[in-house]
Each structure stands twice: as structure tokens, then as C-alpha cells.
Amino acid sequence: MSITGAIVLYAVTWFMTLFCVLPYRTQSQDEANHIVPGTPPGAPAGEVMQRKAWVTTLIATPIWAVICGIILSGWITVEDLDWFGRMKP
């Protein structure tokens, strides 16, 4: 795996983890009983993105390391994913 491939894999892993982390422990303005005029009641009540980014990084990094380890060890290769037999042996 090249450096570029590792960076792209980390970015994909990080953003997928972010989308899983975003809904957890988020309090809406309606739940906090403080709705700012001009915003929907379901908008987040506080600024939580920095904390969510740190949590995402802490979760995504070991996941990325495991995926990199599997790819670099050769345990799963591209030929293993050739379900239709289109790659030459």
C-alpha cells in the first residue's frame, strides 16, 4: 500500500466513523429549552464538533490500523475479492 492509499483509507475510515459518532449524545435546542430565533428546534444546542472530532479520531485510528494490517499482511488480497472471475490468475 502506498502512502497516498493509506491517507485515502484513513480519510474514508475517519469520515465513516464521524457519521456514526455524530448522533450520539447530541442535545437539540428543543431538548435544552433554548431555541435561537431563525434556527430549527432540532439543531444542536451547543458546539460539539471539536469533541466529536477527537472521539472520531480516537475510534477511527485503531480501525484504520487493523485494516492496514490486514492489507499489508496479505491475509486478504484483491484476488480474494474477485467474485466473478474477471481477474487473470
Image: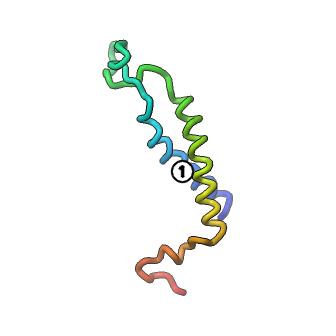
Question: Residue extending furthest bottom?
Answer: 89
Q: Position of residue 14 (x, y in %)?
A: 54, 46
Q: Tell me the residue at 61%/66% (across/down).
A: 71
Q: Position of residue 27 (x, y in %)?
A: 40, 24
Q: Tell me the residue at 42%/28% (across/down).
A: 26
Amino acid on which the number 1 mark rests in the picture: Thr
| Residue annotated with mark 1 | 13
Q: Is residue 16 above or below residue 83?
A: above
Question: Residue extending furthest right?
Answer: 3
Helix, strand or loop for disc 1: helix
Q: Tell me the residue at 56%/29% (across/down).
A: 50
Q: What sort of colour scheme is used for the picture? A: rainbow
Q: Position of residue 66 (x, y in %)?
A: 61, 57
Q: Tell me the residue at 47%/39% (across/down).
A: 21
Quarter of the view holding residue 25: top left
Q: Position of residue 47 (x, y in %)?
A: 49, 23
Q: Is residue 12 above or below residue 69?
A: above
In terms of depth relative to the viewer, which is nearer, 11 or 76? 76
Quarter of the view holding residue 35: top left
Q: Is residue 2 above or below residue 42?
A: below
Q: The N terminus is located in which quarter? A: bottom right
Tell whether 44 sits left or right of 56: left
Tell whether 28 sits left or right of 1: left
Q: The C terminus is located in which quarter? A: bottom right
